[in-house]
Amino acid sequence: MNPPNAAPVIMVMAAGAATRFGSAKQLARLPNGCTLVRHAALTALETGLPVQVVIGAHGELVRAELVGLDLAIVEASEWWRGIGRSIAQGVEALLAKRAAPSGLLLTLADLPQVTSFDLTRLADLHRQSPDRLLVSGFGDNRGPPCLFPADCLPALAALDGDDGARAVVKAQAARVTAVPLAAAGLDIDRPDDLLKMPLA
């Protein structure tokens, strides 16, 4: 078990080609003028936790949006194999560069209504129950942001394909806790979705 003050790492996924969106979704601008990927990175950094952003498609353009931010950038060279493989490459890079964190808080660049308070809440719950796998609940759905205990990292590093981390969550169903988080259900799939964002 990890010590009570152990901290997870936040990993922001921003590697996909966004075929449904029709262009580089990571670079789409919110009403406040910030791109999705920079907004997600800034939100993660506001928690004070270590942050890693995984990029892939449109890599150089996405990287340029992260200039000046105190975070690690990992390029998923096999992003085209799906988000599962991008997650795996992000975890591989994380484990290669530092001692294993107490957990991995996995979030997506296209969840602009998820706040630093939401992420901090998940991290606090993780510290209280470090062996639980936390998933965000919105209505009848479950999904990211998710916080995986450290012993799930090898399974995350073995992912491939388009199903993301669902297989890991399913395999660990006995210790999954759903945390109500309505903002997690408001993702950006198409340009029109940006019009629904009430960001200043």
Image (spheres, helix red, strand yellow):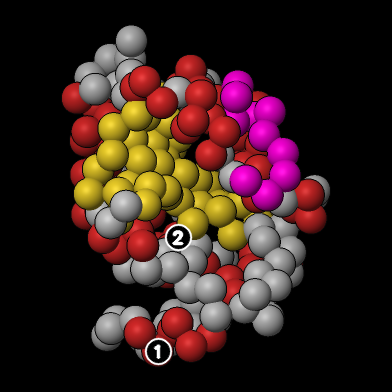
Number of labels in the image equals 2
Give me the residue at 53% from left, 73% from top. Answer: 189
Give residue 195's mark. Answer: 1
Label 2 sits on a secondary structure element that is helix
Give me the residue at 60% from left, 24% from top. Answer: 155
Give me the residue at 70% from left, 72% from top. Answer: 19
Note whether residue 145 is visible.
no
Residue 179 lies left or right of residue 94; in this view the side is left
Can you name the residue that lies furthest to the front here? 140
Out of 98 and 115, give the one closest to the viewer: 115
Label 1 CA crowd tier, 10 Å (few <14, some 14–19, many 20+)? few
Residue 179 lies left or right of residue 18; in this view the side is left
Out of 191 and 98, give the one closest to the viewer: 191
The residue stretch that appears in magenta: 154-163
Which amino acid does the dot numbered 2 rest on? Ala
Which amino acid does the dot numbered 1 rest on? Leu
Give me the residue at 53% from left, 85% from top. Answer: 191
Q: Are marks 1 and 2 in contact (CB under 8 Å)?
A: no
Does 175 lie within the magenta span?
no
